[in-house]
Amino acid sequence: MKKILFIIAIIFSINSSAQNINNFCGTEVPENYFNSMDEKREILENYEKKYYQLKANKTSTAITNVPVKIHIVTQANGTSAISASDVIAEIEEANSYLVNSFLEMNICDDINYIADNNLYAFDTDEQGSLYSHNQPDILNIYFVESITSGGNGICGYTYLPGSSNQYYDVIVMDNQCTTNADGDTLLHEFGHHWNLIHTHGVQNGTLTTELVSGSNCSSGGDQICDTPADPQLNGSNVSNVSCVYTGNDTDAQGQFFDPDTSNIMSYSPQSCTNSLTNGQYARMYAGYHTFKSYYECPSFNVDFTSDENQDCDDTITVNFTDTSVGAVSWQWDVDGDDVIDYDIQNPSHTYSLGDYDVTLTITNSNSASITKVFPAYISYDSNIYETTTVNLTVNVANGINQNTWEFKDSSGTVLDSGGPYSSSGQYTHALDVVSSECYTFTIYDTQGDGLSNNAPGQGAAGQEYYILRTDDNSTIYWNSNFGWEEDTQISTNYLSLSDINVSNFSVYPNPSEHTINIKLNGESFPERYLIFDINGRVILNKIVSSESDLAINIESIDSGIYFLNIISNGREENVKFIVK
């Protein structure tokens, strides 16, 4: 539901570099925010990439139900200006947008009513008292009659992600800003909670550094490139009737701004705001899965564990164990194709190479259902390596005498072993291997905390980890916190794949990460070749017109098993290859 904003200070523009406005939103960007984001940059970018893949491929489009705990603060006599139906309607409207981020807010259990006159007219100086009602592991949303912060009235606020302290798993909303018909403050605050900042950037009252050209869009403004530069939109430079921007500010290059007055994360009049961009939806999707996926409702929650059994034939069997709360039936989509694969509680599934989302929907005895998506829960790369040595590095900091390891062949014979390590430092071992064999590397930890006893302040030397590499220094596997023990399988069955001599052609290297080459073996150029995945879908269809076409770039192809169909002189020949 939309809300009218009551601006309690005169809005005016000083000049093109600053504007003083009264903020309807009290969310602030903390000083360490960008450092926190940098630490999670790779994870965030991977989730954003995943979001765009979902949008493009229309697969694994299940919506994750995110639980929220509703608290309504009343006067001491139990009365309030807001009702449960008002709250539900507001959340439903927010969900109509959030669904584009594959998220949906679900109210967990009964509403908690707090009868307290002091908190009813809430001042942020009293937030400790309000937050004492927080429920752990969930987003707590408080509805109060009014919010005052630093002497100013605001419509709502929350906290950007980055802190691990659940004290900040909170949104606070003003009742009037929730129930009035012309606004979107709750959705605006959801945006912040899932990692959106204002389109004008981090600082209110300061002209954005983002250029109109968008050339610095990833570092200026809201750091999202499909939202145009925002020169601090507000009621003084945007008509609340026509929603036309009337300002004449220019950026650092002298270009006039052309902002989007409809964006919900701006300070444009809320009678105008009704849109978010794909970049913002992607950022929220990434924000939830990176920082807040631990949210759960104690009476009704989706969760599971799994264990994996890996084979040297590039398949892996995963046994799922449901640990959900309140479930009486289950629906599993274990490979991210929006098709229900199992309707039993604890299924097992065998995967080939690739990344797979796992989605579990549970239903309770009241026929209510909730869903949770676990993006790329299964990530399985080829374990076939063309190498004569496996090089092991173990870096020990404070975990003295905790770690040992074994290296076994396919018969279970221990070929080599090492540890425990009696002092801190880096230990290296060269493990000889032969072709056409399957090896298992197992590392153990006597304390059950893996290699996680880091030494703060010592930089890289103080970080515990182990890493396995081939003789050309390619990484096979690395990890730090693996618990009690962990297995890694390494296959050297590459001779059955490399330089496969079919009648007229061979393919090398195989497996490969970047490029495969077609060798002619004395045959003339083929006319065409096609690449198929294991499901028979055509990945590439190429007419050969020059020798350069025989080098095939496979960097954009997901890890997995593929078939190269070579057509020459009316004949077809097939070669199996692996993308690592």
Image (cartoon, rainbow, N blue to C red):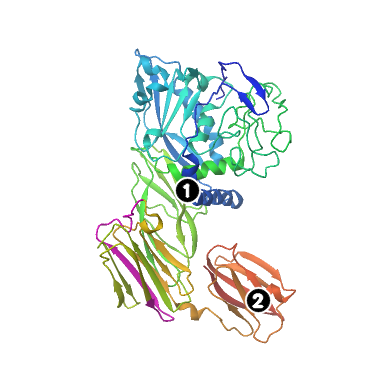
Q: Is residue 445 magenta?
A: yes
For residue 61, above or below residue 473: above
Q: Residue furthest front?
A: 458
Location of the N terminus (image quadrant): top right
In the figure, residue 395 lies in which quadrant? bottom left
Could one spot residue 430 in this view of the protein?
yes
Between marks 2 and 1 in the image, the one whose residue lies nearer the viewer: 1
Q: Residue at x 59, y 78 (%)?
A: 507
**Residues under numbered marks 2 and 1 in contact, where contact means CB atoms less than 8 Å apart:** no
Was residue 389 drawn as part of the magenta stretch in this picture? no
Q: Is residue 305 above or below residue 513?
A: above
Front-most of 361 and 488?
488
Residue at figure coordinates x 68%, y 67% from the top left = 541
| Label 2, residues with CA under 10 Å away: few <14, some 14-19, many ≥20 | many
Label 2 SS: strand
User: Who's the residue at 35% across and 77% down the image?
Assistant: 410
Q: Position of residue 86 (x, y in %)?
A: 48, 22
Image coordinates for residue 382, horizontal then vertical, percent: 47, 68
Q: Residues within 10 Å of mark 1 (few under 14, many from 20)?
A: some
Quarter of the figure with residue 409: bottom left
**What amino acid does circle 1 point to?**
Lys
Residue highlighted by disc 2: 566
Q: Is residue 63 visible?
A: no
Residue, disc 1: 40
Q: Position of residue 54 (x, y in %)?
A: 56, 50
Classify residue 496 as left or right of residue 413. right
Residue lying furthest top: 77
In this picture, which residue range is highlighted in magenta?
431-456
Type of the residue with mark 2: Ile
